[in-house]
Amino acid sequence: IEAGGESAGPIQHAGEEVGYLLEGSIELMIGERTFRLSAGDSFVFNSELPHWYRNVGTARASIFWVNTPATF
């Protein structure tokens, strides 16, 4: 994610998401909460919650991000 870049807006869908921030810093918004993450931080959340992100740093941010359907 380039500096100043962001997702296209809140999305929500079935599944779960997990990620690890490799470099840079981002804000990750999940529902009504905002989390500021830096390199080395990780996250996991239910994809049914509205979520989006933006790069709040001055350099590119890189995230290893996995989305999976919910297990039944």
Image: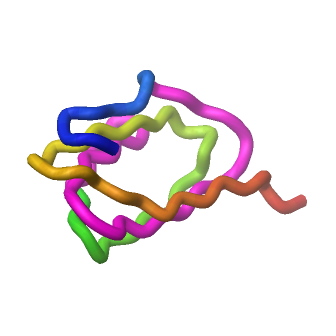
- Membership of 66 in magenta stretch: no
**Which residue, as the protein is rendered here, is positioned at the far right?**
72
Number of numbered callouts drawn: 0
Which percent across, then down, holds residue 12?
A: 59, 32
Range of magenta residues = 10-36
**Does residue 23 sit above or below 4 in this rendering?**
below
**Residue 56 appears left or right of 22:** left
Q: Residue at x 21, y 56 (%)?
A: 25
Q: Residue at x 35, y 69 (%)?
A: 22
**Which residue, as the protein is rendered here, is positioned at the far top?**
9
Q: Which quadrant holds the C terminus? A: bottom right
**Residue 71 appears left or right of 28:** right
Which percent across, then down, holds residue 15?
A: 71, 49
**Residue 62 appears left or right of 57:** right
Q: Quadrant of residue 61?
A: bottom left
Q: Residue at x 19, y 34 (%)?
A: 4
- Membership of 18 in magenta stretch: yes
Q: Residue at x 28, y 33 (%)?
A: 5
Magenta span: chief secondary structure: strand
**Scheme by which the image is coloured:** rainbow
Q: Quadrant of residue 53?
A: top left
Q: Which quadrant holds the N terminus? A: top left
Which percent across, then down, holds residue 8?
A: 44, 23
**Does residue 28 sit above or below 21 in this rendering?**
above
Which percent across, then down, holds residue 67?
A: 65, 54
Q: Quadrant of residue 13?
A: top right
**Does residue 21 sit above or below 7 in this rendering?**
below
**Which residue, as the protein is rendered here, is positioned at the far left?**
58
